[in-house]
Image (cartoon, rainbow, N blue to C red):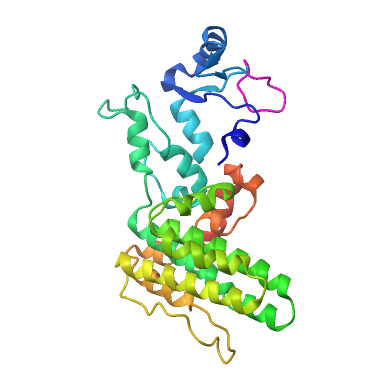
Amino acid sequence: MTPRRSTDHNWGPRLQLFLADGKADQALAVSELLGVRLPATFRGYPTVFATSGVQAQPHGHWVEVAALRGWLQRVLGFDPAGPVELLDWLSVPTQALAEVTGGAVFHDGLRTADGDKRALTAVRSTLSWYPHDIWLYVLACQWQRIAREEAFPARAAEAGDDLGSAVIAARLARDLMRLVLLMQRHYPPYSKWLGSAVARTPAARELLPPLTEGVAARNWPDRQRGLSAAYEAAARLHNALSITAPLDPAVRPAYYNRPYEVPGAGRFARALRDQVADERVRALPLTGAVDQFIDSTDAAGSQSVLRAAVAAAIEPA
């Protein structure tokens, strides 16, 4: 990331300040006070910005003041202070889970309802990662996404559509990157930061060189070589987790009777699903968490849309 590019517009300190739930009506007054009391600059950067065209607070600063539970319900679509249900887990985009559980907490003075724990810390602990069976299910669904298109780059190239082959290969590369993050217990971020997130993980050394080769290739043989090596790296990482019996990591030399190298991703999906102990989770269709089957930035910003879509996918008609 180049500092010059990062700081070219509306760059400055940003903070979230959470109030107790019973004091939500004081948020505007606190924001107004900050608008008056904040220093003009902090470490050389401005603290106040023009509100036109940016998401700053009404007084131009980047300190968001909100009641904790209200903010969580707005971001997540549910209150994580209570039981977190299957619909809750599957309806929140991973980028939102990453937002809530990531970043520094400088002070956590709010308490849970029983006064036993620090409220924000408790929520972040609850949402730090999927429950085990849901994790297995989400992994199975990510392998299933790959299974649905694993033969298409070769078929498109064989039909003379090299551009189509490259586009599908790029889709599969994105699915592999998200899969590898999920295997390493990292919530995949917004697409702009996906490559950066993978690059910071231990799997990057094996995965990224062949994946880069596959995406950058100008012809099908080179594209297939890169994708195949990346598939095998992901399969080895799967085996290292010991969450299923070991599976042969080598790509399959044929797809039915066609000479396409594929990972046979469906076998990973089936093996993972078989390890799910919760019968309710095991019975779910392999559609997955919401951002495994909805790919729209605008939809991702509407919790009502996301929850309705997941409910329709997972609940019996």
Is residue 176 depicted above or below 107 in this figure?
below
Residue at 64 percent across and 69 percent down: it is 168
Tell me residue 95's x, y (percent). 51, 46
**From the image, which quarter does the C terminus lie in?**
bottom right
Say above or below: 178 vs 148. above
Q: In this view, does 60 lie to the left or right of 95?
A: right
The image quadrant of residue 291 is: bottom right
Q: Quadrant of the N terminus?
A: top right
Q: Can residue 228 be seen in this view?
A: yes
Number of numbered tags placed on the structure image: 0
Residue 11 sits in quarter: top right
Occupied quadrant, residue 104: top left
The residue closer to the viewer here, 273 or 258, is 258
When the figure is inspected, residue 288 is found, relative to residue 217, above or below; the finding is above
Residue positioned 38% across, 43% down in the render: 127
Q: Is residue 206 one of those drawn in magenta?
A: no
Q: Where is residue 80 in the image (x, y as percent from the top left)?
A: 40, 38
Q: 27 or 308, which is in the foreground?
A: 27
In the image, residue 187 sits, relative to residue 18, either above or below, namely below
Furthest residue toward left: 116
Position of residue 18 in the picture relative to residue 214 (left or right): left
The range drawn in magenta is: 49-59
Image location of residue 266, percent across then percent down? 47, 76
Q: Position of residue 211 (x, y in %)?
A: 53, 66
Which secondary structure class fits the magenta region best?
loop
At a point 50% along the width and 64% down the height, the residue shown is: 209
